[in-house]
């Protein structure tokens, strides 16, 4: 079974709301075996242009678990706050 990674690239619009969102996301990951791999800020693009300065990488045991997390009522309830707080691109990868 392959692991799945959710990669989020974001530009924060409202730091207070972003902090509220971030403080609630971890609890939504745990039931699906999700774990935060890292969060970071862009330092330099060696090639091309990345429009979002911040990144997060979350690992799940499987693609099904990643999809279950994203579709869960707990995470879906956070999406309006996320949309107010930041412009976010979420992409899922399987490895």
Image: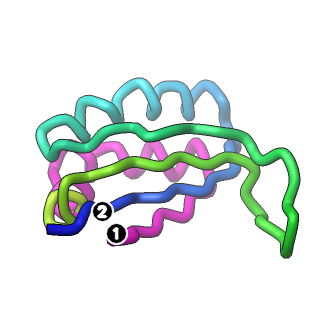
Q: Is residue 50 above or below residue 20?
A: below
Question: Looking at this rendering, what residue extends furthest in the bottom direction?
Answer: 48
What is the secondary structure assignment of the residue under circle 2? strand
Looking at the image, residue 68 sits to the left or right of residue 53; the answer is left
Horizontal and vertical percent position of residue 87: 62, 56
Task: Give the labeled residue for mark 2.
Answer: 4
- The answer to whether residue 94 is magenta is yes
Q: Residue at x 48, y 46 (%)?
A: 82
Mark 1 and mark 2 in contact (Cβ < 8 Å)?
A: yes
Magenta segment: does it hold 2? no
**Residue 49, how many percent across, how many down?**
84, 70
Tag 1 or tag 2, which sits nearer the N-term? Answer: 2
Where residue 2 sits, quadrant-wise, is: bottom left
The picture places residue 67, in percent across and down from the top left corner, at 21, 65
- Neighbour class for label 2 at 10 Å: few (<14), some, many (≥20)? many
Identify the secondary structure beneath mark 1.
loop
Q: Characterize the local packing of mark 1: few (<14), some (14-19) or many (20 or more) Cα atoms within 10 angstroms.
A: few
The residue labelled by disc 1 is: 95
Asked whether 45 or 84 is in front, the reply is 45
Q: Position of residue 90 (x, y in %)?
A: 47, 63
Query: Horizontally, is 79 left or right of 90 in the view?
Result: left
Q: Which residue is at the front of the view, 53 or 75?
A: 53
Q: Nearer the viewer, mark 2 or mark 1?
A: 1
Magenta range is 67-95
In the displayed structure image, the side of residue 40 where residue 76 appears, left or right = left
What residue is at 16 percent from the left and 58 percent from the top? 65
Q: Is residue 16 above or below residue 28?
A: above
**Image quadrant where residue 61 sits:** bottom left
| Residue nearer the viewer, 63 or 54 | 63
């Amino acid at each position: 079974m392959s692991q799945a990674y959710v990669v989020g690239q974001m530009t924060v619009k409202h730091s207070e709301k972003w902090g509220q969102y971030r403080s609630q996301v971890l609890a939504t990951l745990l039931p699906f075996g999700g774990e935060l791999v890292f969060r970071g800020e862009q330092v330099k693009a060696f090639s091309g242009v990345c429009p979002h300065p911040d990144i997060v990488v979350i690992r799940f045991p499987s693609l099904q678990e990643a999809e279950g997390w994203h579709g869960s009522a707990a995470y879906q309830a956070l999406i309006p706050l996320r949309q107010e707080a930041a412009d976010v691109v979420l992409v899922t990868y399987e490895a």
